[in-house]
Amino acid sequence: MKKQTEQSGVMEKIVSLAKRRGFIFQGSEIYGGLAGTYDFGPLGVALKNNIKNLWWKRFVEDREDIYGVDAAILMNQNVWKASGHVATFADPLVEDLKTQKRYRADHLLEDAGIDPKGMTPAQMDALIKEKKIKSPDGNPLGDLKQFNMMFKTHVGGSEGDEAISYLRPETAQGMFVNYKNVIDSLHPKLPFGLAQIGKAFRNEIAPRDFIFRLRELEQMEIEYFVNPKIAPDAPGGWQSVFEHFRLQMHDFTEQDLGLAKSKVHELEVADGDRAHYSKRTIDFEFDYPFGRKELYGLAYRTDFDLRQHSTASGVDLSYFDDETKERFIPHCIEPSFGVDRTVLAVLSDAYHEDEVDGEVRTFLKFSPKVAPIKVAVFPLLKNKPSLVKKAREVYVMLKKELGAVGIHGIEFDDNGNIGKRYRRQDEIGTPYCVTIDFDTIEKIDETTGPTVTVRDRDSGKQERVVIKDLLKRFTL
Ligand code: ATP
């Protein structure tokens, strides 16, 4: 096979494959869509669940010091006042005075070759005016305004201010407000963390790049609490915990997701560019087909959130150390992962094309751990009952045996000819195809029993394997 992975137009190909094969669809598609929303189809949800399960296993199940929670999406509006979101969770926006279309001021400056990093909204506004920057349609722009990105709603029958709530823009606050509940119910000792996977909503002005910048997104976040009295670089101190999670985040991308190491980069966020609550932030960036962009974040949030919520709620969120008899507000390290950006990284890293018999073959080179379908089982011919019967037997056996160890995604397929089935499985990234052919039922070695062929997705090579050795043949 000739390798000819193509870079140009890869995003369009991924979007089209994702739709054609049932991974990802435009949200509300039959009504013309809703910008910034996407729906996951049968294969997309399996891929996404595999990613979330791998994350949950690494960061919650395999550890003793991180506890899972699942907080409500709607929260008391005071949560978002205390966290600073009501006042500051805003994007700088300018309006085209002719078309009334709105644009991100920082994006317009970038497009004009000016780096907006570290600039205040007032500085951006002044520069847009000074450089006479126009809208993409060539029209004059109005004054810069701060646009709050939270979706506002009213809870219950009242439309008054007291009934205001927001769809949460991050899962993090659900953990800070449950910190005391977990301490009071499970009595964990520092250092310990809370973890959560769930939806978040941001009214992005310019949703774009498929599922990269969404208005409805999903996050996997950890709030890990440490004792600020421990020296930063001593075990349990903030710096050593930060370093531990930095390495864990790399291990997650490489060992669990199978992402190419060379495509994941760290960016130390400079003083002026960090969020107001952070004393250190590393952005993990990924080489997407449309450029190097933020995949994850790792931040040292100090005691900002617990202190704010203590003051605003009047509930004491300090921690009492039994050993030293000291009381203090813990500090927090936050590793934050976007589920959708992970799905896109996995899809784009996996996308490959090569040439088989003069034809272009598209295949997704998923790591078996994330692949939605792990093994597909075929009878060579659909109209030979003896082949179909044996194929179903093998399928049921694999489904049962692998299901017993928590591995799902075993598929039976007898549609079309065998070549078409291989192409379809290649396109959805199935690592192994098992075919039951005439040798399976006719050439049976008395000592080893019947054999099948196992085809490897990446090389396209087939080998004969004894059915009872099949499970050993797979690396899943
Ligand atoms: P960006 O600078 O790209 O807007 P951010 O720095 O605001 O992202 P965080 O607030 O740190 O992002 O959110 C944590 C993670 O949630 C991000 O690293 C990303 O993976 C994901 N995320 C944030 N905003 C979006 C979005 N609009 N669509 C999809 N994922 C998102």
Image (tube, rainbow, N blue to C red):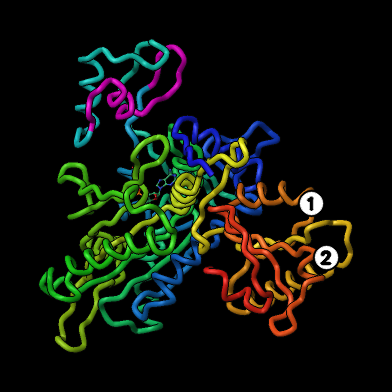
Quarter occupied by the N terminus: top right
Instruction: Please state which amino acid type lies under the numbered disc 1.
Output: Asn
Residue 310 is drawn in which quadrant? Answer: bottom left
Residue 425 relative to residue 165: left or right: right
Asked if residue 290 is among those painted magenta in the image, a careful observer would answer no
Residue that numbered label 1 is attached to = 415
* Viewer can see residue 167: no
Residue 359 relative to residue 387: left or right: left
Residue 282 relative to residue 170: left or right: left
Instruction: Please state which amino acid type lies under the numbered disc 2.
Output: Leu
Label 1 sits on a secondary structure element that is: loop
Decide which of tag 2 and tag 1 comes sooner along the chain. Answer: 2
Badge number at residue 333: none
- Rendered position, 9 above or below 135: below
Residues in magenta, as a range:
95-116
Residue that numbered label 2 is attached to = 387
Residue 344 relative to residue 359: left or right: left
Residue occupying image coordinates x 21% and y 21%: 126
- Rendered position, 125 above or below 10: above
* Viewer can see residue 50: yes
Relative depth, front residue between 402 and 32: 402
Task: For ligand 1, tell me if the residue under mark 1 lies within 8 Å.
Answer: no
Give x and y (percent) for residue 220: 43, 59
Asked if residue 99 is among those painted magenta in the image, a careful observer would answer yes
Give x and y (percent) for residue 331: 22, 67
Residue occupying image coordinates x 33% and y 61%: 249
Residue occupying image coordinates x 45% and y 18%: 100
Relative depth, front residue between 193 and 447: 447
